[in-house]
Amino acid sequence: MNIFKVIKNLALYITPFLAVISLEAQTILVSDIDDTIKASNVRSKVNRLLYACAVENEIKGMSRLYSQLASEIPDLEIKYVSSAPEFFMRENHEYFLEYNSFPNGELSLRKSFFDSSNDHRISTIEMIISETKPQTLILIGDNGESDPEIYDYIFNKYSQKMSILQFIRITYPHETITNDQTAFVNPIEICLKLEESGIGTCSDSLIDGFYKEITQEEVAQDFGSYYFHPYMDCNGYQWPELNFDRSELFENISNHLEHKCHTQTKSLNQNLKKQVFYQTKLFDGT
């Protein structure tokens, strides 16, 4: 018997099975865009139009985080799933991702204004799950629209089949998220929670870099890359529970983030009072 022929035939036999295993044994990161990685102020009808075509308004640190995850996790695939209309926003979102150096990933947008944004995103995520059969699914969104409800639906339906981690950016007044969802206002929380789950590494240098930038960040303008954009209202945010032995550094970071959210909300309320005052004066003619 020719041993080389046997090995060749065996290789031909098992290769398709190895390909299937390789295809299915992967980590999928599904990311929203507006108010998750791009400052969009979706709850303001006026501002969302002003922000829509801007490309420099990255939520700071998110492209750095995604790039690190892509470099550390060989089988990671990133899917950008947004309810923005295809014909109006595809070119802009593609340019935004490229301009801010986000890792390559498939971009899925809503095909028609008449399609339900929730149905579009749920069906898209379910199609991704069906096609890739991931072992780990990472869902990153915000509390501006329906991300918490959509991700909770996916979690309840599929968490018995795979590991699912959910992250919700607190951009607007703190609404209820589930116990299975991690609130965040900065990439640090995502990075640390993923490391705690055995996904990627959140190095001290990366954490220190984020922390230094946060503490030195100037008052945000309407456009630009910031951690805390001027419309952000994260009052009530609380640092997530983490099982790490870096308590002193974490305490400094968590205290700063919680304080920043408090002062950010206070500033927003003061600005709102000023707007109401001047509008009243204008209509009263005084």
Image: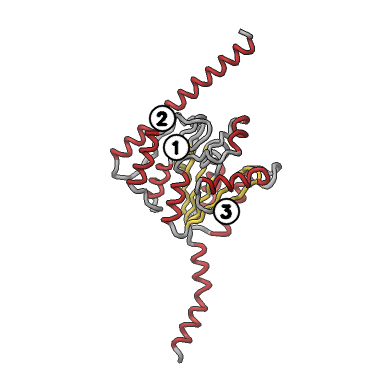
Secondary structure, mark 3, is strand
Residue under label 1, please give it.
185
Q: Could you say where residue 88 lies in the image, as x and y percent from the top left?
A: 67, 43
Residue found 53% across the figure and 17% down from its top: 274
Residue found 56% across the figure and 19% down from its top: 275
Secondary structure, mark 1, is loop
Q: Could you say where residue 49 lies in the image, as x and y percent from the top left?
A: 62, 34
Q: Are marks 2 and 1 in contact (CB under 8 Å)?
A: yes
* Residue 173 seen by the camera: no
> Which residue occupies the foreground of this view, 57 or 279?
57
Instruction: Answer above or below: position of 264 versus 188.
Output: above
Closer mark to the observer between disc 3 and disc 1:
3
Instruction: Answer above or below: position of 11 versus 282.
Output: below
Scheme by which the image is coloured: secondary structure
Instruction: Answer above or below: position of 268 versus 94.
Output: above
Residue under label 2, please give it.
260
2 or 1: tag closer to the N-terminus:
1
How crowded pointer 3 is (Cα within 10 Å; few <14, some 14-19, many 20+) is rated as few
3 or 2: tag closer to the N-terminus:
3
Q: Are marks 3 and 2 in contact (CB under 8 Å)?
A: no
Q: Is residue 48 left or right of residue 257?
A: right
Which amino acid type corresponds to the residue marked 2 in the rendered image?
Lys
Which amino acid type corresponds to the residue marked 1 in the rendered image?
Val
Q: Are marks 3 and 1 in contact (CB under 8 Å)?
A: no
Alpha carbons under labels 3 and 2: distance apart:
34 Å
- Give the residue furthest to the top: 286
Residue 106 numbered mark, or none:
3
Instruction: Answer above or below: position of 254 versus 122.
Output: above
Secondary structure, mark 2, is helix
Alpha carbons under labels 2 and 1: distance apart:
10 Å
Q: Could you say where residue 87 lies in the image, as x and y percent from the top left?
A: 68, 45
